[in-house]
Image (cartoon, rainbow, N blue to C red):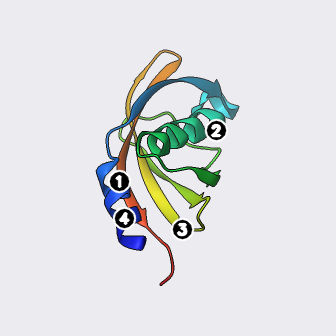
Amino acid sequence: MQRTLTKRMAAVLGVAGVLALAAAGCGTKTIDHSDEVDLVNKQLDSQNLKAKSVDCPDDVEAKEGETFNCDVTLTNGNTGTYAITVEKVSDDNASLRVTGAKNTTKK
């Protein structure tokens, strides 16, 4: 089962989304936390995987090239981490793409 998860996670790279930005203090724009979680869930759905929980940071700066990780626990108990990169920022929107995946299930 772990190999299947690893193969699926490796094959899921590429789901992207255009998301709205939230304003943080000092004029810094950040990625909306719920949009990050939605992007990961969309990625999982595309591979017929279901999340029990998705944990993404809530203070990611909307800056092109910025990369952050979201930790995932699947309904079957396996765990993984998705790397997400901010590809483009335009006005109040940001384009994000899943750029990496790693199985973190303990053997």
Residue assigned mark 1: 100
- Judged by depth in the image, the label closer to the viewer, 2 or 1, is 1
Closest to the observer, 43 or 69: 43
Disc nearer the start of the sequence (2/1): 2
Q: Amino acid at mark 1?
A: Gly
Q: Amino acid at mark 2?
A: His
Residue assigned mark 4: 4
Give the x, y percent position of residue 12. Answer: 35, 47
Around disc 3, counting alpha carbons within 10 Å, would you say few (fewer than 14), some (14 to 19), or many (20 or more)?
some
Q: Are marks 1 and 3 in contact (CB under 8 Å)?
A: no
Disc nearer the start of the sequence (2/3): 2
Q: Amino acid at mark 4?
A: Thr
Disc nearer the start of the sequence (4/1): 4
Q: CA distance from mark 1 to mark 3?
A: 17 Å
Image quarter in which the N terminus is found: bottom left
Disc nearer the start of the sequence (1/3): 3
Disc nearer the start of the sequence (3/4): 4
Q: CA distance from mark 4 to mark 1?
A: 16 Å
Q: Which mark is residue 78?
A: 3
What residue is drawn where x is 62% and y is 44%?
59
Residue assigned mark 2: 33
SS at mark 1? strand
SS at mark 3? loop
Location of residue 94 with respect to 40 vertically, above or below: above
- Judged by depth in the image, the label closer to the viewer, 2 or 3, is 3
Give the x, y percent position of residue 100. Answer: 35, 53
Q: CA distance from mark 2 to mark 1?
A: 19 Å
Around disc 2, counting alpha carbons within 10 Å, would you say few (fewer than 14), some (14 to 19), or many (20 or more)?
some
Q: With 49 as the anchor, is 76 left or right in this view?
A: right
